[in-house]
Amino acid sequence: MQWPSSADPDGSDMAFSVATNGEPGVFDLRGDLDLDTAKVLDEVMIVADPNQTVVLDLSDLAFVDSSGLRVLIQVRRRIIDTGAHLVLRQPRPNVRRVLEVSGLDSVFTVED
């Protein structure tokens, strides 16, 4: 499943999308997570069971700004409130650098 839905099957006409890849609890983030697109991630209802690990795969996330960081923090808070755990997987070097500069690399669990 992909959010937002797109007539183009590969979603290439969108600046940002969230998709499931068939692996339980894994969500692929693609494109730019910024002021214009952060609402997409905020509106996706990521449901987690207690003790579940939810993974946001960032390998196709090209860019993130402070609005994107804000929504990542909100998603983390919602997931932790259910008793689950959030992992950010494979951020690109520029996204990892934003996490480091903001100090959020010590807040989130980040996997390579």
Image (cartoon, helix red, strand yellow):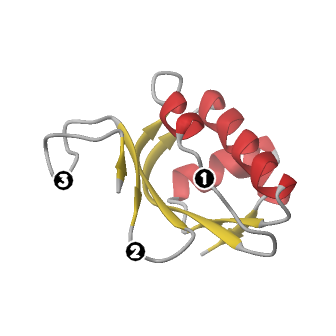
Residue type at the position of mark 3:
Asp
Local SS, label 3? loop
Q: Which mark is residue 46?
A: 1
- State the residue at coordinates (82%, 47%): 103
Residue type at the position of mark 2:
Gly
C-alpha span from label 3 to label 1: 21 Å
Residue 94 x, y percent position in the rendering: 53, 50
Left or right of residue 61, residue 64 in this image: right
Hey, which residue is sitting farthest left in the picture?
8
- Image height of 61 relative to 23, above or below: above
Quick check: can you spot residue 95? yes
Local SS, label 2? loop
Looking at the image, is mark 3 or mark 1 earlier in the sequence?
Answer: 3
The one nearer the camera, 108 or 81, is: 81
Residue 111 x, y percent position in the rendering: 65, 74
Q: Which mark is residue 22?
A: 2
